[in-house]
């Protein structure tokens, strides 16, 4: 596709519910990132994939958060047993390679946990 | 650890005046620096990057940024501001130090308000 696509755009979850957020990166992009952005704040790194390999998951806030990219393209971020503090915008980004390439961001999924 | 700082939460400028949004960085090794802009309810849009070479980098929408190694700064500039430039601006550094990750580390953001 022309850009990074994320779905759904908005998600309201009841506390304790599991959610799955999808990211379709730009075709051919090797690197894929997930970020969490609180209102009015900068994006905070969650995890990084190079093709299907998850090379860095140091930013995942708890073991309730899980990400996968099984075929090196589409990625899913899953949050189990959602809590109110999980409410945020989740941004996905992709870039051609590691190193000096810029990342292209999707529009994000706004998650509200009630 | 790599980091960037944006010392101003908000910058106000009159339309037609030059604008500057400040960013300082702290890196080990060569800095790879980026500016992104975010409009309401949108993702981040890439503006420009510094990898190596000329200290003045030109980017999208008439923006440019000046890399200053001695002051460890990478300020975003535009000669003549437009009301439509009003948005949230993020400086970022790419973390090349950690093996295999290359994650982007973002500043806290600066809200730019251009007044008509």
Image (cartoon, coloured by chain):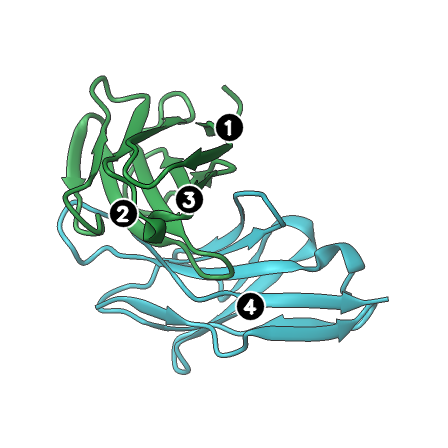
Is A84 left or right of B59, judged from the image as shown?
A: left
Return the residue at label 3: A114
Dot 4 falls on a residue whose secondary structure is strand
Q: Give the residue drawn at x 79%, y 59%.
A: B83
Return the residue at label 1: A3
Give the chain letter for cyan: B
Q: Is residue B79 visible?
A: no
Q: Chain of mark 2?
A: A
Q: Earlier in the sequence, mark 2 or mark 1?
A: 1
Q: Do marks 1 and 4 share a chain?
A: no
Q: Are marks 1 and 4 in contact (CB under 8 Å)?
A: no
Q: Give the residue drawn at x 65%, y 74%.
A: B11
The numbered mark at residue A46 is 2
Q: CA distance from mark 1 to mark 4?
A: 25 Å
Mark 1 vs mark 4: in front:
4
The numbered mark at residue B110 is 4
Q: Do marks 4 and 2 share a chain?
A: no
């Amino acid at each position: 596709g022309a850009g990074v696509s994320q779905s759904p755009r908005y998600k309201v979850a009841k506390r304790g519910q599991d959610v799955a957020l999808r990211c379709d990166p730009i075709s051919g992009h090797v690197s894929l990132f997930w970020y969490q952005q609180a209102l009015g704040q900068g994006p905070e790194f969650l995890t990084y994939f190079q093709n299907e390999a998850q090379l860095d998951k140091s930013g995942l806030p708890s073991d309730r958060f899980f990400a996968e990219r099984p075929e090196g393209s589409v990625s899913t971020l899953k949050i189990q047993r959602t809590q109110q503090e999980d409410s945020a915008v989740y941004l996905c980004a992709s870039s051609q390679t590691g190193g000096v390439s810029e990342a292209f961001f999707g529009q994000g999924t706004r998650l509200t946990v009630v | 650890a790599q980091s960037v700082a944006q010392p101003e939460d908000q910058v106000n400028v009159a339309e037609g005046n030059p604008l500057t949004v400040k960013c300082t960085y702290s890196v080990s090794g060569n800095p790879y620096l980026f500016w992104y802009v975010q409009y309401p309810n949108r993702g981040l849009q890439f503006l420009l990057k510094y990898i190596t070479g000329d200290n003045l980098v030109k980017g999208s929408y008439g923006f440019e940024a000046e890399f200053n190694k001695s002051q460890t700064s990478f300020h975003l500039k535009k000669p003549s501001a437009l009301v439509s430039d009003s948005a949230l601006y993020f400086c970022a550094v790419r973390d090349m130090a950690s093996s295999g990750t290359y994650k982007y580390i973002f500043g806290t953001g600066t809200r730019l308000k251009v007044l008509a």
